């Protein structure tokens, strides 16, 4: 990742944490990732498995964060389908 991208993401994280201090760090990062994928033209949302892989964190942590974010009205989620425990997330 380029230093400009890292700086941009750091500023976005700080702004989100200031605007929504109730969010845990994990929730804030998952929300930012969901918004990034959505803004990059993936209008169908982003799979929680992909977020977990990209952020190098446990899928269960992403799922818990997604549940909290959906309860808080930040995202919507739908099951990916089949036997997969993954969810497809979209920002509200």
Image: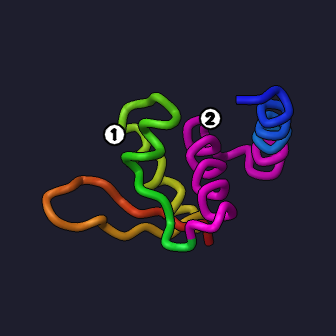
Say if 49 sits above or below 70 in the image. above
| Left or right, residue 52 beside residue 23 | left
- In the rendered image, residue 53, in percent from the top left (x then y), is placed at 42, 36
**Residue position for label 2:** 25
**Residue position for label 1:** 60
Q: Residues within 10 Å of mark 2 (few under 14, many from 20)?
A: few
Quadrant in the picture for the C terminus:
bottom right
- In the rendered image, residue 31, in percent from the top left (x then y), is placed at 61, 52
Instruction: Tell me which segment is drawn in magenta.
Output: 15-42
Quadrant in the picture for the N terminus:
top right
Which SS class for mark 2? Answer: helix
| Left or right, residue 42 beside residue 86 | right
The residue drawn where x is 46% and y is 53% is 66
The residue drawn where x is 41% and y is 63% is 88
Farthest residue, direction front: 2
Question: Of helix, strand and loop, which mostly describes the magenta segment?
Answer: helix
The numbered mark, 1 or 2, whose residue comes first in the sequence reads: 2
Farthest residue, direction left: 83
Q: Residues within 10 Å of mark 1 (few under 14, many from 20)?
A: some
The residue drawn where x is 62% and y is 35% is 25
The one nearer the camera, 23 or 44, is 44
- How many marks overall? 2
Which SS class for mark 1? Answer: helix
The one nearer the camera, 54 or 67, is 54
**Mark 1 vs mark 2, CA separation in Å:** 15 Å
Q: Is residue 37 magenta?
A: yes
Quadrant of the rendered image containing residue 78? bottom left
């Amino acid at each position: 990742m380029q230093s400009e991208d890292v700086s941009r993401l750091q500023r976005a994280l700080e702004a989100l944490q200031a605007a929504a201090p109730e969010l845990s760090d994990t929730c804030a990062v998952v929300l930012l990732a969901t918004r990034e994928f959505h803004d990059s033209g993936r209008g169908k949302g982003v799979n929680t498995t992909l977020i977990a892989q990209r952020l190098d964190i446990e899928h269960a942590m992403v799922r818990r964060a997604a549940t909290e974010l959906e309860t808080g009205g930040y995202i919507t989620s739908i099951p990916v389908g089949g036997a997969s425990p993954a969810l497809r997330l979209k920002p509200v």
